[in-house]
Image (cartoon, rainbow, N blue to C red):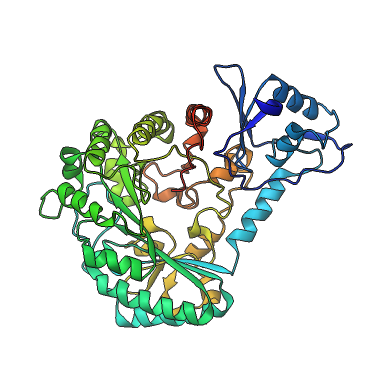
Amino acid sequence: MQDGMLQLPVVNLQEPAQAPTRGGMNYKPSRFNHFHTLPTGEKLAFNSLSGGLAVLDSEGWARYTALVKGEPLDPKNPVDQGLVEGRFVVLENFDELAYLKTLHLRQRYTTEAWSLTICPTIDCNFGCDYCFQRHRVSRMTEAVQAKLLEVFAQKAPRLSKFFVTWFGGEPTLAWDVVQKLSQGFMEIAERNRVEYSASLITNGYLLDEGKVADMVRYRIHLVQITLDGDAPYHDQRRHLLTGEGSFERILANLRLFLGKPVFVHIRVNVDVRNREGVPALLKRLAEEGLAHQENLRVYFAPVTSTAPPSHGVKGFCFTRKDFARIEPEYFTLAESLGLATLPYPSLQLGGCVAAHPEGFVVEPDGTLQKCWDTVGQPEFAVGNLLEYDPLQLAENPVYQRWMSWDPFSEELACSRCTWLPACMGGCPLKVVFPEAMPEGKVELECTTFKWNWKRTFTLLAERAGEAEPAPRPCTG
């Protein structure tokens, strides 16, 4: 190991510190450090603010220990330089929490970028038992479509980026709305030199070659499609309203994306009922030729019962801690099959968009929600797009509660957590509206890295030592 420290190729520092050109300054350990002793005796080091990952041998660990005990930094020593750039050590008078909060507020309240979720319909062709929505036949009105274009046109001269998430219900049931609005957004963006892109959340059943071609045309660069295990497991819980299974058709539709410039996230929702069906799904995907594709990745998510319509599945849900125990098993298998890379924490500076002033979900009738999980629930609405006025929105008590979200509050354990940069408090809904939770109390949604990082990062370290280049961080 060279110079006492191995900077793993997997590292992409998110918030690197500038290494000083002179010594004479005292350093302290970062509050966001995580250390783990590897079987080799070396120290695995990760910093959740910088995203820095390193392996320290005995000499590297000795330098870290010396610096935090007050020994002067040697600016010519590459180990010292790496420890500073990776933020494993910080200046003694540097307030990391205040720095992180400043970065959080800058991103949360930026007016240069706008993220909007649009529901062309909240109707759905599926009858999933854990769904958090109350579906109804609906279609976005012409008036709401016109207002969306009008509001974007008003904001565009001050924006650098505009990102839309097409949501539902099932957005492919109103595909013409997606087409029309996408075309309008692109024209406005081009006139104002705004960078426009979009994503699509779909069950995947109604996809066809024409829709995939539209995605390329309308800059829908990311698509999320869900499969909850192999056919017997998936069809039991994600079936059509008629009760007919959907697995085989979705699987066939996934092949439509092969070789296309659209990135596909295959989401696998997991609870105690289908946990055994995940390995069979991964093997089936590989058998169907969906492995080792540059634009396709699988990831795993625990089923939740946040919104009232889904409270009935509470007893089947994993706790975050329990899910963290099985998640590495799934990722390890998926990686071995060429369906995923090992996950890597990303910096969540702005936190959930629901707590951003202009972060909205637009329902078909113009109702403005702040969160995907509250779509179709009028008691959580903060206004209507047809009467859009930011000052009036500020008078809405529900809106005010969303804006009160503060992951740095001393009342929350988040402000004292070493994983705060990678989590930023998780889901605000579970804190700001505790009465809506199944247990009627605050529920913190911690990152699963809090419990499984040692296992995951040990694998990353092993991979980096085996081959070049190392696996890329998972960006999904």
| In this view, 165 is above or below 457 | below
Q: Is residue 80 left or right of residue 167?
A: right
Q: Looking at the image, which residue sits at the far front?
A: 468
Q: Looking at the image, which residue sits at the far right?
A: 24
| In this view, 135 is above or below 437 | below
Q: Is residue 155 left or right of residue 4?
A: left
Q: Is residue 376 left or right of residue 14?
A: left
Q: Is residue 66 left or right of residue 371?
A: right
The answer to which quarter of the image holds residue 276 is top left
Q: Residue 352, position in %: x, y?
A: 50, 54
Residue at 56% x, 73% y: name it: 159
Residue at 29% x, 54% y: name it: 258
Give the mark count.
0
Is 434 in front, or is 362? 362
Is 404 in front, or is 90? 90
Residue 443 visible within the image:
yes
Check the picture and name the quadrant holding the N terminus: top right
Residue at 27% x, 41% y: name it: 313
Residue 412 visible within the image:
no
Is 153 in front, or is 337? 337
The answer to which quarter of the image holds residue 142 is bottom left
Q: Residue 369, position in %: x, y?
A: 41, 65
Q: Residue 209, position in %: x, y?
A: 22, 64
Q: Residue 44, position in %: x, y?
A: 60, 27
